[in-house]
Image (spheres, rainbow, N blue to C red):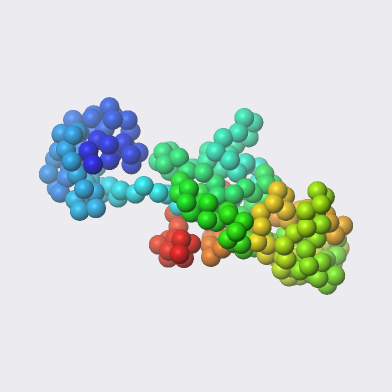
Amino acid sequence: MRLDKLLANMGYGSRKEVKNLLKQKAVTVDGAVVKDAALRVDPDKQDVSVFGERVIYTEFIYLMMNKPQGVISATEDRYDKTVIDLLDPLSQHFQPFPVGRLDKDTEGLLLITNDGNLAHNLLSPKKHVPKVYYATIDGTVTEADIKAFKQGVELDDGYVTKPGELVILQSGPTSEIQLMIQEGKFHQVKRMFEAVGKKVTYLKRISMGSLVLDESLPLGDYRELTEQELAQLIQ
Ligand code: URA
């Protein structure tokens, strides 16, 4: 691949800006200063560095975000901030998108990537990827709700949900629960509780398939997936 293309792809600016970097002698290939934008390089075999820092060439980016409330799970929005607005410019350069949607007022695990294949596999209804949510509920959640969710409940549009696994963490006028579902219908968790006469007052996604929210991530922060997380997710 041409050196200027590699550097532009990796977010070091436009081809023109990359030319300036080369002029400044900021770029080395295997330790030697290079000024030729058209030089062919193999980033897997050669050490391409900018200002002494090695450029690790990747096509895909995989980020785990702890989504805060008040931002939209989309790449752009006319009125509100999106999860993509929370990313640094270098990450944005890869043109990532959120895998699936969390409501504006939902927190928690959101995978952000530019790997369309992975996104498709995780979102495909055929793959039954389990998603686990934690929620607080206005109302007493009961054994009857566990049974109802296991059998499937009828949502407001007539759709009957696939079996969900409800665990009551605390039951009372305000209950705390964990719910595992294998679908991703619009507002699904909120509508499932509406179907049994209760209201979700707080919702957070904890996991999606093998990927579990890193609770040490502050709300609104994100990090790259570890190699292990990625390997488990794509297998
Ligand atoms: N179910 C909901 O109701 N909202 C979400 O954001 C995710 C699942």
Q: Position of residue 77 (x, y in %)?
A: 60, 33
Q: Residue furthest front?
A: 126
Q: Position of residue 67 (x, y in %)?
A: 59, 50
Quadrant containing the N terminus is top left
The answer to whether residue 201 of the structure is visible from this angle is: no
Q: Residue at x 67, y 44 (%)?
A: 104
The image quadrant that residue 134 belongs to is bottom right
On screen, residue 7 versus residue 87, left or right, reads left
Is 195 located above or below residue 38 in the figure?
A: below
Q: Residue furthest top?
A: 16
In the image, farthest residue toward the bottom: 143
At which x and y percent is residue 202? 73, 54
Front residue of 5/176: it is: 5
Judged left or right of residue 165, residue 153 is right
Q: Is residue 159 left or right of residue 105?
A: right
So how many labels did they put on this image? 0
Residue at 62%, 56% in the rendered image? 125
**Position of 173 compared to 181: left or right?**
right
**As displayed, is residue 144 above or below residue 14?**
below
Residue 43 screen position, x and y as percent: 24, 49
Tell me: residue 80, above or below residue 163.
above
Q: Is residue 186 above or below residue 131?
A: above
Q: Residue at x 27, y 36 (%)?
A: 5
* Front-lying residue, 214 or 216: 214
Q: Is residue 226 visible?
A: yes
Name the foreground residue: 80 vs 182. Answer: 182
Q: Quadrant of the C terminus?
A: bottom left
- Identity of the residue drawn at 23% across and 30% down: 19
